């Protein structure tokens, strides 16, 4: 199985504020492990939830109002048609209508990159954010949810197959910002059921596979999942994350790769913190883990670097995000000279 590279290679989250497709692709290609950008300001079709909703039965998409909703009546009408297309990979891939950027990315020569990456919104976050006619998340429905888990797994696998045709070391992020709410008190969806669903979902997702999220979930649960890569906002959550050293150790021992998001992409936060300071903050996180027994060389060899989060709203539009991408490359040079 292809292995996700570490050794402080750089990548980033896919959601970007750009309206120029080529400029966004150029920024993605400026990192070691490029990805296809998701550009909701370019088109509502490029929104991560809308892209995940393509061909999902029951979806009500209003491009003019930029809304994404769900109808049980429409779901029942369309479900059989979808089930008849289960073996059609084109049906489950991201179409050019839903992402011009994705198809432009697939036209590039990416074979010499250490890896490339794709992404799709995960079922938990999708199910939280898509509401039915009663304004209730579809995640809570016992009929829709099992289908949704299968549907999203199939879509992720089809995309990964496409990407592996461009680079043998391709891997996928399942974007799951909703995981930070997964085990909170939610009517209709308990934590035991949530854990079972997540295990069932990832058992269907091809490797290499992982999760990206910017929030603060149940880290112990997440690190114990059968993942190959975990991407997190260590800029915000570093102090909490290092308290799970035992689970981090087990994750690394299984060969898992951590993507350390330390560089902020928000205008105010970025302006406040210089690269040397951010680099020292990341080293402090690592030093804490090393002091708890995690091997230094193991951690470095299974680490990548990225911005801390996505950011769609800045007073300078895309400029701070682009500066953050550049800063991640600078951080790699500083840390690489010291640890590689």
Image (cartoon, rainbow, N blue to C red):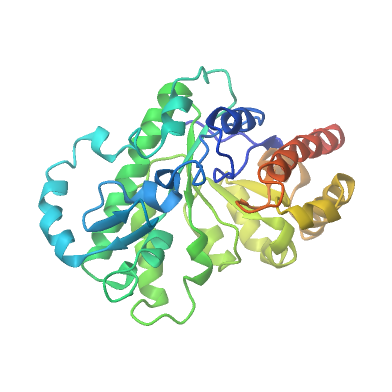
Quarter containing the C terminus: top right
Above-or-below relation of 113 to 253:
above
Residue 73: image location, x then y, percent: 15, 65
Q: Is residue 223 above or below residue 9?
A: below
Residue 20 coordinates in the image, percent (x, y): 56, 33
Q: Is residue 327 above or below residue 231?
A: above
Q: Quadrant of residue 25?
A: top right
Q: Position of residue 177 (x, y in %)?
A: 52, 60
Side (left or right) of 70 relative to 280: left
Tell me the residue at 37%/43% (across/down). Answer: 156
Residue at image location 35% in from the left, 40% down from the top: 157
Q: Check the image and name the residue furthest to the front.
A: 64
Q: Is residue 245 visible?
A: yes
Q: Nearer the viewer, residue 138 or 256?
A: 138
Seen from the viewer's position, the closer of residues 282 and 314 is: 314
Locate residue 86: give its quadrant. Answer: top left
């Amino acid at each position: 199985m292809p292995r996700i590279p570490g050794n402080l290679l750089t990548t980033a989250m896919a959601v970007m504020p750009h309206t120029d497709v080529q400029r966004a692709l150029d920024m993605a290609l400026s990192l070691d492990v490029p990805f296809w950008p998701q550009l909701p300001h370019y088109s509502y079709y490029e929104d991560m939830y809308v892209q995940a909703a393509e061909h999902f039965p029951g979806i009500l998409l209003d491009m003019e109002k930029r809304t994404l909703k769900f109808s049980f009546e429409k779901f029942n009408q369309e479900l059989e048609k979808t089930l008849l297309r289960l073996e059609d990979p084109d049906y489950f891939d991201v179409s050019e209508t839903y992402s011009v950027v994705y198809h432009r990315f697939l036209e590039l020569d990416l074979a010499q990159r250490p890896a490339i990456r794709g992404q799709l919104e995960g079922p938990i976050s999708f199910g939280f954010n898509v509401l039915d006619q009663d304004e209730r998340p579809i995640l809570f429905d016992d009929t829709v949810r099992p289908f949704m888990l299968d549907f999203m797994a199939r879509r992720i696998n089809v995309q990964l197959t496409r990407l592996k045709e461009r680079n043998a070391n391709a891997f996928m992020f399942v974007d799951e910002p909703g995981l930070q709410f997964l085990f909170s008190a939610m009517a209709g969806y308990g934590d035991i059921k949530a854990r079972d669903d997540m295990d069932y979902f990832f058992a269907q997702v091809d490797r290499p596979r992982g999760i990206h999220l910017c929030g603060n979930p149940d880290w112990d649960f997440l690190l114990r999942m059968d993942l190959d890569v975990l991407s997190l906002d260590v800029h915000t959550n570093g102090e909490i994350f290092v308290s799970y050293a035992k689970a981090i150790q087990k994750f690394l021992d299984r060969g898992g790769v951590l993507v350390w998001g330390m560089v902020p992409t928000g205008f105010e936060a970025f302006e406040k913190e210089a690269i040397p300071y951010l680099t020292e903050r990341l080293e402090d996180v690592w030093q804490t883990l090393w002091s708890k027994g995690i091997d230094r060389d193991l951690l470095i060899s299974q680490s990548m670097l990225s911005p801390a989060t996505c950011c769609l709203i800045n007073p300078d539009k895309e400029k701070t995000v682009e500066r953050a991408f550049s800063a991640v490359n600078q951080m790699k040079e500083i840390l690489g000279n010291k640890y590689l």
